[in-house]
Image (cartoon, coloured by chain):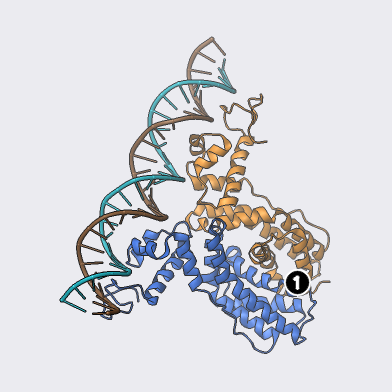
Chain colours: A orange, B blue, C brown, D cyan
Amino acid sequence: MTSQDAGRPGSAGTSRRSKITPEREREFFDAVLDRIRECGYDAVSMEGIAARTRCSKSTLYRQWRTKPRFVAAALRSRRQARFAGIDTGTLAGDLREAARCAGEWSPKDTQLLQALGHAVLQDQELAEALREALVDPELAALEEILRRGAERGEVDAGNPALAFVPAQIFGVLRVRPMLEGRHADPDYLVRFVEAAVLPALGLP
Amino acid sequence: MTSQDAGRPGSAGTSRRSKITPEREREFFDAVLDRIRECGYDAVSMEGIAARTRCSKSTLYRQWRTKPRFVAAALRSRRQARFAGIDTGTLAGDLREAARCAGEWSPKDTQLLQALGHAVLQDQELAEALREALVDPELAALEEILRRGAERGEVDAGNPALAFVPAQIFGVLRVRPMLEGRHADPDYLVRFVEAAVLPALGLP
DNA sequence: CCGTACCGATACGCAGGTGTATCGATACGC
DNA sequence: GCGTATCGATACACCTGCGTATCGGTACGG
């Protein structure tokens, strides 16, 4: 999976002298995001990524010009709404499913957010890429879930707790490692939704 | 307030050739924590702090040996339980007051946590100092508030929502800047407590 | 089968940061 | 008034990272 020698030239196989394939690009992006999660943005160097992916520093700079642009590209390539397809038919079901789903991706995404949280203050493009990749899609999907629940009449659209649901879920996701030293796994998040979020919305 | 020339020698007044006074030390600590909030841990340099406080780099290194030790000392000097003295007589009142209080300190503490969040992974002493200064005291005080509420019978000690209250409050505190671009001010936090936390606990 | 476009390796300039060492100057205790 | 401890200034060695430039080799298209 890393970068051994095989035979297929056009693929991400071996001699690596060909134009960068999408698979190869993904290896770069995986590497840099992994390293950022581990060491933080500042501690990651282009040279380190080059070494780790067995490419040349020149290649990275030729392709993406600077480190922040490179990282931003990596982030954008990960853009996806993890709980976009959720639709169980009930608000409670949707929220439980979202919690489970969030818990699944929690370690990776939470670490990334933490690691990039301050780098973002000094590079506009990086900030946009981060929102675009990790924040906005999930937020929109969650708001859609809530909107549907209100539309079905499961919860009063004026319920003041509604507006805090996203902040609660993302918040708990984010601080559990700090408070309890463990990631917010699916089980924990589902328990949280059932114990705190649903009751505040007046749901069973 | 910064460092102009006056007359009193023993105080933090002027010529600055005397031994470091506690007031002077506080200036160093203020400076480094401020800069860390602004730029992040890595971007802060000892030289920068020396310049900003008009002392010599030698002084900082003589006193604290290394950058992480210096920052850790600064953190420890800020140790305090912001909502330790809260006791309004009711759980709802205490939580409202804690929210108000947390909102007041939110900008500074949240920024610090964000800025140090990853530096902490690479320096044990720094990690301990951070918990000691910003996390543990508040967490303990909050748990004390909840314990008293349960003791008074305002909430069932077995209520599953109880265990999530700290994570809810700290979480929302932490992610509001990311989600809405504004700090979690007292008003916002109090509304949150009233709309989501109290109802989940079965309180009015 | 050849040309070109792209990759890999490497060296370089530049900037900045850490932590040390040296030296002169000055406040403070005695 | 004198000695000592400590500060301030500065220079230094060392490292690391960013981004550029150069050069040789190789895959791929025609």
**Callout 1: SS:** helix
In the figure, is residue B130 to the left or right of A108?
Answer: left
| Residue positioned 58% across, 54% down in the render | A130
Q: State which chain disc 1 sits on.
A: A
Q: Which residue is mark 1?
A: A196
**Residue B204 at least partly seen:** no
Instruction: Pick the residue in front: B179 or A34.
Output: A34
**Quarter in which the C terminus of chain B is drawn:** bottom right
Q: Quadrant of residue B178?
A: bottom right
Q: Quadrant of residue A31?
A: top right
Instruction: Pick the residue in front: B62 or C29.
Output: C29
The correct choice, above or below, for A162 with respect to A35 in the image is below
Instruction: Pick the residue in front: A98 or B15.
Output: B15
Which amino acid does the dot numbered 1 rest on?
Ala
The correct choice, above or below, for A33 with respect to B23 in the image is above
The correct choice, above or below, for B31 with respect to B86 in the image is above
Residue B86's spot in the image, x, y percent? 61, 85
